[in-house]
């Protein structure tokens, strides 16, 4: 097998495992939320935010955030509060069950980061830079399509 094929096989395996891990986080919680919604919960754990602030933070469109937030509100994880001074502005914050789910997702996220950090210690700083460069170029493929 060529080196490129080995890399592609390893990347495909990682993507499948990561997606599976994300599904386990949400299914373990017994809730119908996706990775984007889980990320929004993590952001709202620290402070109430508007649709625009959330869209900027996760680099998604405002309509995409609206759709995600509507699902979170429907599942009673998020509440919407209209700003008293600017009635056009709505802030979103977590309910107690949203807080619990955000903590679970954050814990799983931290566990994944810890594993990644452990793996990266097997590589020299120069190798780590090469890995980073490769992944950035790989991400550009998706950005250009």
Image: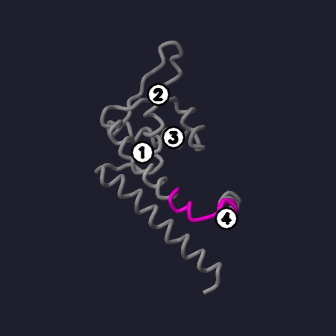
Distance Cα–Cα, label 2 vs label 1: 17 Å
Magenta-highlighted stretch: main secondary structure? Answer: helix
Q: Quadrant of the N terminus?
A: bottom right
Where in the figure is residue 108, as x and y percent of width and height?
Answer: 40, 51
Circle 2 or circle 4, nearest the eye: 4
Task: Name the residue located 42 percent from the left edge and 29 percent from the top edge.
Answer: 93
What segment is highlighted magenta in the picture? 117-132
126 falls in the magenta region: yes
- Is 111 left or right of 55, judged from the image as shown? left
Residue located beneath label 1 in the image: 106
The label number, if any, that marks residue 48 in the structure image: 2
Sequence-first disc among 3 and 2: 2
Circle 3 or circle 4, nearest the eye: 4
Distance Cα–Cα, label 2 vs label 4: 40 Å
Sequence-first disc among 1 and 3: 3
Circle 3 or circle 2, nearest the eye: 2
């Amino acid at each position: 097998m060529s080196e490129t094929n080995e890399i592609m096989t390893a990347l495909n395996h990682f993507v499948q495992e990561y997606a599976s891990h994300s599904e386990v986080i949400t299914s373990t919680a017994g809730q119908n939320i996706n990775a984007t919604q889980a990320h929004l919960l993590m952001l709202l754990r620290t402070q109430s935010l508007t649709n625009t602030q959330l869209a900027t933070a996760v680099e998604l469109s405002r309509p995409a955030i609206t759709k995600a937030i509507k699902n979170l509100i429907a599942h009673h994880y998020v509440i919407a509060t209209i700003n008293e001074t600017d009635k056009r502005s709505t802030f979103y914050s977590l309910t107690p069950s949203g807080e619990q789910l955000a903590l679970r997702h954050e814990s799983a996220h931290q566990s994944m980061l810890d594993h990644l950090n452990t793996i990266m210690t097997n590589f020299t700083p120069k190798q780590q830079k090469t890995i980073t460069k490769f992944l950035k170029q790989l991400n550009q493929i998706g950005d250009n399509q």
